[in-house]
Image (tube, rainbow, N blue to C red):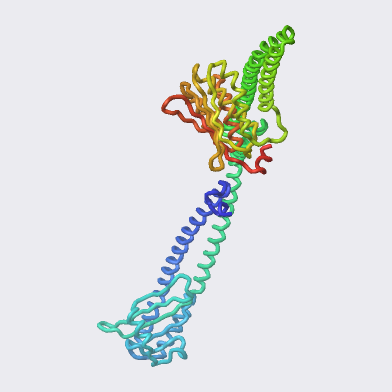
Amino acid sequence: MLSRLDPRSWPITVKVPLAVASLMVLVGLILSERVLARLADTQERHLRDLAQSYLDGLSSAVAPSMLRDDTWEVFDAIERARDLHRSLRPLETVVSHADGRVIAASDPRRHPVGSSSEERQRVQVAGAESFSFEAGADTATAVRKLSYPGQTVGFIEAVFDTRHLAAERRGVMLALVATNGLLTLLLATAGWLLVARMMRPVTILTNHLGLARGVSAVPIAEDVVVRQRGEFGRLFRAYNALAASMDERETLVKKLAEEERLGSLGRLASALAHEINNPLGGLFNALATLRTHGHLAHVRANAIGLLERGLVGMRDVVRTTLAVYREEKRPRDLVASDLADLQLLIAPEARRKSVSVTLENALDGTLPLPSTPVRQAILNLLLNAVAASPEGAGVVLNASVSGGLFVASVRDRGPGLPEAAAQVLVGPMAVTPLRDGGGLGLWTTRRLVSELGGRIEVDHPGEGGTLLRLVIPLRSAQELSDVA
């Protein structure tokens, strides 16, 4: 839920229209402010000029009457000025002496003749020859000082109706808001449609790449590729070529892995045949001895003992082979005897290379791990260790459980595991077998251990050789059933 609120996680088809709309709103606000400011300046300048014209005419008309203190003449001048400047819409006009006493006003009831107001005196003195107008206000005020050479004889204060100017300003503001809002909506919609159209190929490619993480890469349909032009067309064709290359490489890796498995089985079969063939000669000799000297008790006992030991050895070899390579319908838990079987199974190959294999088995009871993949992984490492060890050297297999982890280490005295081969074991799963076809056994081991949720560690001890350590977490019964 929080990731959806984070703007960084929004798709670009949302970000771009929002950015366009935000920029349009910002531009609209700036333009609207400039238009309204220019309108206010124009209205104020126009109103100021009209007010000055009104006051100029009125001051010329009332000045002689004020000197004679002729109230009726001043009233008459105010009425004539109001009729003459009707378009200016004067609401109120007050003519007063320098001391603030009213001589005449357009509304005598509100401003009786002779009345005085401290507020009017303050406004007149402070705002002599002033004009006051605020954009959007309903009224404007103008004050004119009447002077006689050397002295101030009075003031004219006029209030004008500016509601029509405020209505004009509101109309302009509504027009700007409507126009900017419509343009913002149109441009945001156009931006969304344009970006959605432009991003459609990217969406297709993203979906195919997402599928490639779980399964093999799926090529883009040819009719979709044909419809694309320019960079996206080349990108789609390059992706399809990559998908085909990955598919071919995966097929080749599987084929090489199967060939390596069959080759390993062939070598083991040859070693097992040699292991079984060796006691056969002794068994046939024992049978010949029984036919010739079977009537002698001590000869018969020795021959029968030789037959029994040879058959037991052959039985153990066959049982171990079946235990390691038998297909199991349900996973069987790993037990200590599984590692003893591996030691017996690797013994023919070790004898052929004159290499000793030592088992240090600290396992007790059963472990909640599927035995087949664990045995196969350890067997692959033992085969590689025996193959890498020089004649007369030794290979040590150590197995133990520590902190909920099954740890099996294989140590040899060879020249050391090459870096490229080590990367097959510890690098990302994308690292495939070596280009020369080698490393398939290591790659198979890495795959088996990764499927069990474990890891492989490679170490080079100071005394030489290589130490390979398998670390696999013990699993619950439910997890084992999932593995099955």
Identify which residue is drawn at 65% across, 42% down: 479
Instruction: Establish if 214 lies above or below 135.
Output: above
Which quadrant: the N terminus?
Answer: bottom right
Spot occupied by residue 152 in the image (x, y as percentages of width and height): 29, 84
Residue furthest left in the image: 150
- Compare residues 401 and 112 and report the one nearer the observer: 401
Q: Is residue 142 left or right of residue 467?
A: left
Work out which residue is located at the far front of the displayed protein and give it.
297
Which corner quadrant holds the C terminus? top right
Q: Where is residue 163 shown, x and y percent of the image?
A: 51, 74
* Residue placed most toward the observer, 198 or 35: 198
Depth check: give the residue in front, 74 or 15: 15
Report x, y in % for residue 264: 62, 20
Q: Residue at x 49, y 56 (%)?
A: 26
Residue toward you, 118 or 115: 118
Q: Quadrant of residue 115?
A: bottom left
Q: Is residue 52 above or below residue 340?
A: below
Rendering quarter of residue 222: top right
Q: Residue at x 64, y 13 (%)?
A: 278
Q: How many marks?
A: 0
- Percent across and percent down for residue 259 are 63, 20
Q: Residue at x 55, y 62 (%)?
A: 175
- Residue 344: tell me if it is visible: yes
Residue 249 falls left or right of residue 80: right
Q: For this view, does 24 lie left or right of residue 243?
A: left
Q: Residue furthest top?
A: 292
Q: Is residue 428 visible?
A: no
